[in-house]
Image: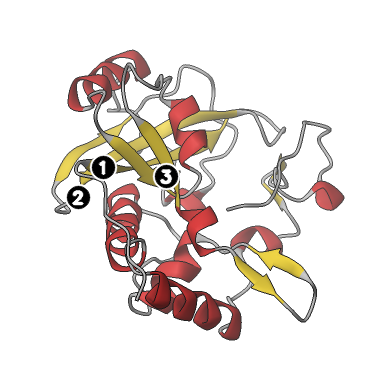
Amino acid sequence: MATRSLPEKYVCIDVECVATGRRHDAHSVALVAIVDQDERVLLKKKVKPREEVMSYLTPLTGLREGDLDDGEPLESVLAEVKRILSPEIVLVGQGIKNDVQWLKLREVEHFSRTFELGELFKAYNHRFSHYNYFSLSHEANTLLHQGFISDEHDPVTDAKASVQLFKKFYADSARLEEAKKKLLRNRPPRSWRKKNNYLWEGVCLAAYFPEKCFCGAPTKKDTL
C-alpha cells in the first residue's frame, strides 16, 4: 500500500467573507480561524469591514446585521495571524490560495507552502470524461460523518474538517482512491448558490460559474 508522510508542521486556515458590492469579487474578510494539526483553535476572530456591507451572505456565513459591530480591524487580525505562522508551516485548506490572498500572506516569509484539499479529492468521472471537484462540506459530510458541516459555515468547524480530511486521506493513496469513488457515488445536495440561481440579495455568486455570472467580474476555474 502506497503511503506518503504528512508534513511535520501544518495548520488549517479558513476565511469567511461578506459582500460589499454586487460583483462576486466585491467581498471583505469577516471571520478568520486557524486550527493546528491537533485540532487546537489557535485563532478565531471577527473582522469589522471598513466598507458598507451589502449582504452578510447569511446562509453561507451565518452572520447577520450587527454581528460584526464588535469585530476587530483587519490590520490587527492580520498581525495576529502572522504572529502565529512561521516559515516552516504548511497551510492546508479548501481554496487555500484564496485565504492566503485575503490574509495577505507571503510564501517563505509566513509559510513554506500551501496544500489544496480540492485538488487532493478531485476525481475523474468516466461517465462524463472530466474531473469532478467537490465542496468541503460534501467531502466532510461524506467521508467523515453526515452533518459535520451545515449550510451556515463556521470557520473553526471548516478548519477542523480540513485537518481531519488531510490526516485521514493524504498519507494513504489506497484509502484516498476509495474516498474519491465514494464522493462520486454520493451526489451532493444542491449548493446554496445553485438553489438561488447564483444570486443573493443582489449579489452575484457565480465566481466559479461563468455561465451564470451577471456582474462581469473575472471568473475562476471551479475547484471549490
Regarding mark 3 in the picture, which secondary structure is present there?
Answer: strand
Residue 53 in picture, x, y percent from top left: 54, 29
Horizontal arrangement in the rendering, residue 113 relative to residue 54 (left or right): left
Task: Give the mark nearer the N terminus: 3 vs 2.
Answer: 2
Cβ–Cβ below 8 Å for labels 2 and 1? yes
Q: Residue furthest bottom?
A: 185
Cβ–Cβ below 8 Å for labels 1 and 3? no
Nearer the viewer's eye, disc 1 or disc 3? Answer: 3
Three-letter amino acid code at disc 2?
Answer: Gln
Residue 119 in picture, x, y percent from top left: 54, 54
Badge 2 crowding class, 10 Å Cα cut-off, few under 14, some 14 to 19, many 20 or more, is many
Horizontal arrangement in the rendering, residue 42 relative to residue 140 (left or right): left
Circle on res. 115: 3
Circle on res. 11: 1
Q: Quadrant of residue 142 in the image?
A: bottom left
Q: Quadrant of residue 32 in the image?
A: top left
